[in-house]
Image (spheres, rainbow, N blue to C red):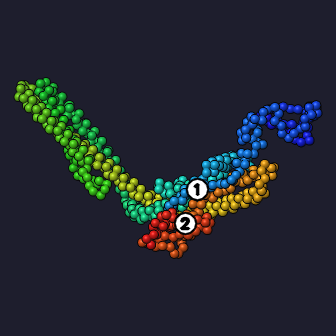
Amino acid sequence: MAISLQKPNMLGANRSFGSQRTTSASTTAAQNLSSGVRPNAFSFRNISKKSWVSGQNTIKGYNQYNYQRTRAALNPRTYTAPTVDRSSVPSYANVNYQPSSSYTNGMKWGMGIAIGLGVLNTVGGMFGGNNKVSASQQLGATISSLGGNSGVSTAGTVSSAAAQAAISNMSGATDSASLRTAIGSANAQLEAMNNQLPSLEQAANQSEGELSGLKEQYSDQQTKAKEAKNDAATAKNTADAVKGDRDNKQHQVELADSAYGKASAKYTQAHDNRVDAELQFNNAKAHWSSLPEEIPDGNGGMKPNPAKEQAKKVMEQAETKLNEAKKEEEQAKTEKEQAYENLGESKAAVDKAEKDLEKAQNTLDSKKALANDAEKTVKDLDKQVKDTEAKIQSAESAISKAKAMKQDIESVRNAITNQQERLTKLEQQEINTYTTSKTKAQDGINKNNERMSQIDGDVDTAKERRLSSQMQRTNAEVKGHQAKMNSVEGNIDQTFVTNELSKQGGGINIGGVMYRTAVNPTTGNTVFARDGVMITEEEYNKETAQA
């Protein structure tokens, strides 16, 4: 089917829908005159009228001239606003509301457009103009205005994660309910930090008194440790030199008699092994003895010292090696004595060489002992240096902790003050949003009532179509205003409970718990509260029924 619309008294001004053709005014006039057909406003041409079904759009563009759907859409012109979920809300809790999906999507698009414009303005400031404000500051201001940033910078001002979180949570809050919650948490964190400060200050004062002495002691110990290392190196070099002399005397014995020399060399090696094993055992035993049997377990009690257990195992292993070395020395000594009995003419030369060897061996044993003692002294002094260094670090840490805590307390306190001011502004902004949106919504409803009265039952007239279209647009606007009202209504009720209702007299006192109820003049809602916490009407009635 095709519908042709011709404007009356304007031959040739013909437009068809469903098919396209163009005619000139002269051609149309000639055709009309020859056929005797008068131009009509609507003509169905050659298409059968039986193919047309009411309410169905079978022709492109036809719905522009079929107002049956428009009538159905406009009547009864009702609107149901999104509901607000305001169940039990704590004094520092967010109020959950459920705006329509169109409102949510609109807010997302609006936020994206606003950020984009802010970034474009920032980029424009970077490449031109006389603006003295940096681009980074402009961008920061744009994001701050959108995200609720309080302008309180925490970078480099706080050291603890708890203080950082307290400030960040307040800065990130974008509505009064979440900001009030964040401020409450920050106040609790501030109180906890103030309670910790005295003990930290006491430890810092004690550390400051000890720090000077510890640093002086540390310097002396470092000097002694350096001297001990030099002494130990000298003792080791001396022992090495004496060992060379002893080895030379051993070679003299071997030259005096080859068979005896082999037995003597075996004994000398076994003796060295026994002396070294004995020194190692004595060192392991001294270390084991220096360790405490128990150490703190971290919970106020004591537990066995695992280091002492490990030192005991090392000592036992050293003792086993010492016993084996003693046996080998005894066996080598027996073989040496047997070889001595078998000496012939070389006995005199052997006796002289053995005397020199024994003297050199005794000197070597004593030098080894001195070198070992020097090494032990180095280890002891190194341990003292490390212990003193740890004490200095602990003292400096105690001083730094007290200083950092004072700085954190100051930062959190200042942030709370700034956020309290922002909370007051947010509360007023939400009230302004509610009242402004309510006024605009009522104005829209009044306009639609006036438009409806002008229609007065006329349908499918130009005036009715114009007013109906206006009513549709206004209904959408009213819906948006009501969504804004619903988005802040719960927050406004909580603000009223916190700032007004909790300070009013009267109420019901049950076991020290105060219950109050009143009408919020801004929203017109009846609110119920328990000790400043907004609750539902059902909770209020149930808990006050016993009064």
**In the image, residue 361 lies at what x, y percent?**
17, 37
Q: Which residue is mark 2?
A: 527
Residue drawn at x 70%, y 48% is: 72
Q: For this rendering, which residue is in front, 221 or 439?
A: 439
Q: Is residue 15 above or below residue 296?
A: above
> Which residue in the rendered view is the most extreme toward the bottom?
506
> Spatial distance from mark 2 to mark 1, Cα to Cα?
16 Å
**Residue 84 quadrant:** bottom right
Residue drawn at x 16%, y 33% is: 270
The reply, left or right, for residue 243 in relation to residue 417 is left
Q: Which residue is mark 1?
A: 83
Q: Which badge, 2 or 1, comes first in the chain's sequence?
A: 1
Q: For this rendering, which residue is in front, 527 or 351?
A: 527
Residue type at tag 2: Val
Q: Label 1, secondary structure: give it.
A: loop
**In the image, residue 353 lies at what x, y percent?**
14, 31
Asked if one can make out residue 517 in the rendered structure from this viewpoint, the answer is: yes
Q: Quadrant of the N terminus?
A: top right
Q: Label 2, secondary structure: give it.
A: strand
Q: Is residue 83 above or below residue 59?
A: below
Residue type at tag 1: Thr
**In the image, residue 343 lies at what x, y percent?**
7, 26
Residue drawn at x 73%, y 59% is: 449
